[in-house]
Amino acid sequence: MTNRERAMALLHYQPADRLPAVHFGYWPELVTEWAEAGKIPKDLAGRWYDGGEIDRELDKLIGWDFNWYHTTGSNNGLSPRFEHKVLEVLPDGTKRVQNGDGVIEKISPGVVSIPAEDDYLLKDREAFETLYRPKMQYFEGRVNKAYYESFNENVYDKSDIPIGLHLGSVIGEIRNMTSVIGMSYLMYDEDEELFADIVDSYADMQYRCAEEILKTGAKFDFAHYWEDICFNSGPLLSPELFDELCARHYKRRNDLCRKYGIDLISLDCDGVTEKLLPTWFENGVNVMFPIEIGTWGDQFEAARNRFGKEMRGVGGMDKTCLRLDRAAVDRELERMRRLASLGGFIPCPDHRLMPGTKFELVQYYAEEIKKIKI
Amino acid sequence: MSIFQEISEKLQKGRAKDVSALVEQALNDGIAPQDILNEAMVVGMNAIGEKFRTGEIYVPEVLIAARAMNAGLKVLKPALTSAGVEPIGKAVICTVKGDMHDIGKNLVKMMIEGKGIECIDLGVNVEPSAVVNAVKESGATVVCLSALLTTTMNGQKDVIDALIEAGIRDSVKVMIGGAPVTQSFADEIGADAYTMDAASAAEVARSFMLN
């Protein structure tokens, strides 16, 4: 079986020859760490991204079949993006930088970390109408129609691995534009319609982008969202408000995908997702990813028990075992064997592999997971 | 409805302007500032903390309530100072070295202040030595340390080590929190408490100060 056939069979509860060895990439610091330790060639450090040349080189060195995060889409974010510029350099060398979303981040020298939000532009109706709404409009250049008109012949039919259509995000990218604090304030702004207007405007544009791609006849194995709207204690907003703001947009976009024959709709959300699952599931999302059990205790089995076989998963493998020893990896492999036997589930590390991950253990995991037959 | 109840309810709904106006009105009516703080605002924040802890409300509702609390405190603080009202204790709070994230830290700070505790906020990416100095200068009896990342959580241990080295470990209770932090990690590094949310953190800090 090809990787695509194997993965699609597993997610459709059909027989497959074995489990695939799939991954979700690496924190760049780990690739550098491996290169410096001589585990991989030095020229592989520093330029890694999902599905890129280095990613595929690492697949060969490690023994992975493929990186699950292999999607394609459109220019469906803010366009044009805000100018990336340094606004201020503080005495300790920390830079206050405006990013492409209009969020001001603090970046300190020598600190390797996810950037921290310091301020943001999207604070009120005026900022939305003058700065953001114009960047959320659909225009022809958002979708490369020529590319998608020959996509099946040039890309899809030549690919051995599943390819997803990236649908964007209903709320996660809005959070990126406002920061968590700004999103919270906007939700309860005196202008009660404002936050919903922002969500609706952005969603309408992303729907149109997806529609224009699908109208070309391009084929996809699944469709995919990125959200990241949960953290260690659960969602960053109430499930009721989330449902009120977002449900109709998931349904509309997912109905569109199904109309064009895409029956697997996956969604990437870190953190503890349990309380938002009903909105996603009831509105057509049926593959959860990456199911962060190691860091946050997110659970696939609980979701399966709750929603039944239509709820599928990719992920759920506690990546932290790859920093320990073979015995820890063996225990996780056994757990993966049990979860995979439920059907509709493909084991994959539950997020990007982090610094301290042992190269030899990753090779071992990739080798062993391929020996499991369902 | 009494003005205390009204302030508490507006605070819980995150109505910052209303809270400011009501606090001002209460002061004008001759109500003691410490009563406004304790009978209205702390009551409101306690209710928010409890609702957050039990999953009845989420981060946005806490943030807007805290914003309203701060708006009310801004009006109230000069009156509290004039009346010689002291906080129940002092806490030093920060996000540890190498970590730039402050949402969790700020939430804890807001909830702690809502308990009538003075909070010395050192910000993010803080050196252990800065925590030691702040404790020495302020006489704080509680230290709250936040970390968002698995790569930075060891910075919490570095602060504990620095407090030991400075000979002041026994004079403070060290509380840790943050997304990747667990009770077992707290035990491993010798912290006095791990709390999984801001409301619990504020409650534990208060209990440390009262006991």
Image (cartoon, helix red, strand yellow):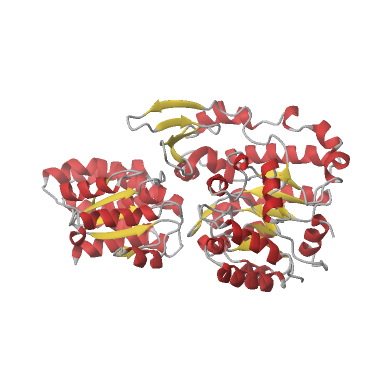
**Residue lying at 82% horizontally and 37% vertically, measured from the top left:** A148
Q: Quadrant of the N terminus of chain A?
A: bottom right
Q: Position of residue B89 (x, y in %)?
A: 19, 55
Q: Where on the picture, by quarter, is residue A209? A: top right
Give whichever of A360, A143 is nearer the camera.
A360
Q: Position of residue A179 (x, y in %)?
A: 48, 41
Q: Residue furthest right?
A: A153
Give whichever of B52, A49 is nearer the camera.
A49
Q: Where on the picture, by quarter, is residue B9? A: bottom left
Left or right of B162 in this view: A123: right
**Residue lying at 85% horizontally and 45% vertically, measured from the top left:** A158
**Residue lying at 49% horizontally and 44% vertically, measured from the top left:** A114
Image height check: is A329 above or below B154?
Answer: below
Image height check: is A178 above or below B174?
Answer: above
Left or right of A11 in this view: B208: left
Give whichever of A356, A126 is nearer the camera.
A356
Q: Position of residue A107 (x, y in %)?
A: 43, 36
Give whichever of A275, B136 is nearer the camera.
B136
